[in-house]
Amino acid sequence: MKRSTRTKINRGILYAILLVALGLVILLADWAAIKENFFDVAVLETLWPEIVTVAAKNTIVYTIISFVGGLVIALVLALMKLSPIGPYRWIATSYIEFFRGLPALVVIIGFGFAVPIAFGWRPPGGTIGAGIIALIVVSAAYMAETIRAGIQAVPKGQTEAARSLGMTSSWTTVSVVLPQAFRIIIPPLTNEFVILIKDTSLLFVLGVAASERELTTFARDAVTTNQDSSPLLAAAVLYLIITLPLTRLIARLERRTQRAR
Amino acid sequence: MTTPTTPTTAAIEVRELHKYFGDNEVLKGIDFEVAHGHTVCVIGPSGSGKSTLLRCVNLLEAPTSGTIIVEGIDITDPETDVDAVRSRIGMVFQSFNLFPHLNVLGNLTLAQRRVRKRSKEEAEEIARHNLDRVGLADKIDAYPAHLSGGQQQRVAIARALSMDPDMMLFDEPTSALDPELVGDVLAVMKELAHEGMTMMVVTHEMGFAREAGDKLVFMDGGVIVEEGDPTEVLANPQHKRTQDFLSKVL
């Protein structure tokens, strides 16, 4: 048998398996149940426009606040971790290891309920504020490691050139090392942003006012009210609308970085 | 701050310099001088310590022991303001080390503004003047990645010159360049030497040493084996190690 014929037969078998599997799914799926539970137009209509103007908007706002806050703390932690002073390094390492080792949900519950109850702490922005602080605290731990790696990826010659021009250590960091480090870590930071978008769904455990609900809380509430799962699918679609362009962007940025090398 | 020293005309004076990397003694007691306005070339096989000696002069490497006096200031004194000393010593690296995130103008003005506290206008004027000196006035808006190696190295020289340094250190400035690009960089360096800049050059370019050098120093194994007038040392080396080295490179 010719090699090309054998390849053709192999391909044919693979396509046949695929068609059989697809056929089984179509035959065995309970389409009536799927339509009723996930595509109930009447239920979906009740969600509009709040699912976008309140829920999706809150998801994005919470993500951005957590990301910016986390980034600032992460930068401090990264610089501490690279400090020549031992105790600074130890504190930063402990922080990073501690919060990377915990589930984000545990930290959110800690800040949302445990800390306020234990110390009578009134978080800025109420319970949802406590939840966002928890996300800041957790994302800072992850981003600190990313920034540290970025700083260390800047060639040593850059620091030497800046120092030999008489620039102080701080000015060298600010105007030579960090701008280059951030360029290197844009793809992993965007990835961290996407993870944060999804992590805002954990704020669901806090139970907040109607106007403060993000996508998951909003969808979950609508599911309970309507005894129908369509809102969950609507939320899923909105998550994808937000995250897919970003993951495409990361892929493009990574290709560009590789070309630049 | 300045340690009183015996009156000297030397721009760089190195006494009993030792440098260890771990247990490895790289410099084994160096005594060395560069007179004002002179160009001193340092040659030697790789691992001879010549680059380490150069890097000790602006404290990119910390000496283990010994004294280095630059323009009458003991830079090995812990009280000395290292940043201030470095800002008066121009340094040119083998790998150029231009700042890739800044264009040529940004590369030339950054330290002028941060360290010399010059105004934007003044810094730009000085940058233009020095770019002109190295023949790259038309590249002022270019980014380093878009320049050839030879152009990058000339920009690096202009960047160092923009700080109005008292002296220039060159660490194998042409070793990373394609052969056809070496000439442009050497031409700029010769011009500087003729203008009376104090220069210390670690190099493999014997032609440059002969033409522009006032003194040639041969190092091997962490010590200065031989030094003297470049033409004489190159034509008539006294020590066997110098003879062996020169017979391989010439």
Image (cartoon, coloured by chain):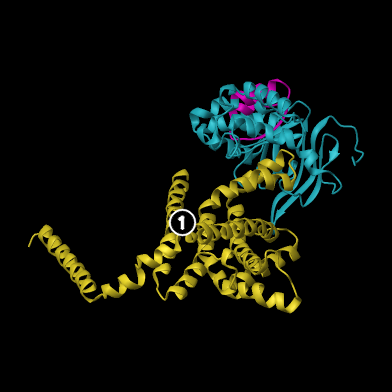
Chain colours: A yellow, B cyan
Tell me where residue A28 appears, x and y as whole percent: 23, 76
* Residue visible at 55% across and 35% down in the picture: B144
Q: Residue furthest left?
A: A1
* Residue visible at 84% across and 49% down in the picture: B78
Q: Nearer the viewer, residue A230 or B205?
A: A230
Tell me where residue A225 appears, x and y as whole percent: 46, 74
Figure quadrant of residue B124: top right
Q: Which residue is mark 1?
A: A242
* Residue visible at 57% across and 28% down in the picture: B141
* Residue visible at 49% across and 28% down in the picture: B180
* Residue B216 visible in rendering: no
Q: Look at the picture and state if A118 lies above or below B154.
A: below
Tell me where residue B59 appears, x and y as whole percent: 74, 45
* Residue B204 visible in rendering: yes
Q: Nearer the viewer, residue B203 or B113?
A: B113
Let me know if residue B198 is in the magenta part.
yes
Under mark 1, the amino acid is Ile
Let me know if residue A238 is in the magenta part.
no
Q: Nearer the viewer, residue B107 or A159?
A: B107
Figure quadrant of residue A32: bottom left
Q: Secondary structure at mark 1?
A: helix
Tell me where residue A77 appears, x and y as whole percent: 67, 60
Q: Look at the picture and state if A223 lies above or below B28.
A: below
Considering the image in quadrants, where does the N terminus of chain A appear? bottom left
Label 1: few (<14), some (14–19) or many (≥20) C-alpha neighbours in 10 Å? some
Question: Badge 1 sits on which subunit?
Answer: A
Question: In this picture, which residue range is highlighted in magenta?
Answer: B187-216
Q: Nearer the viewer, residue B43 or A8?
A: A8
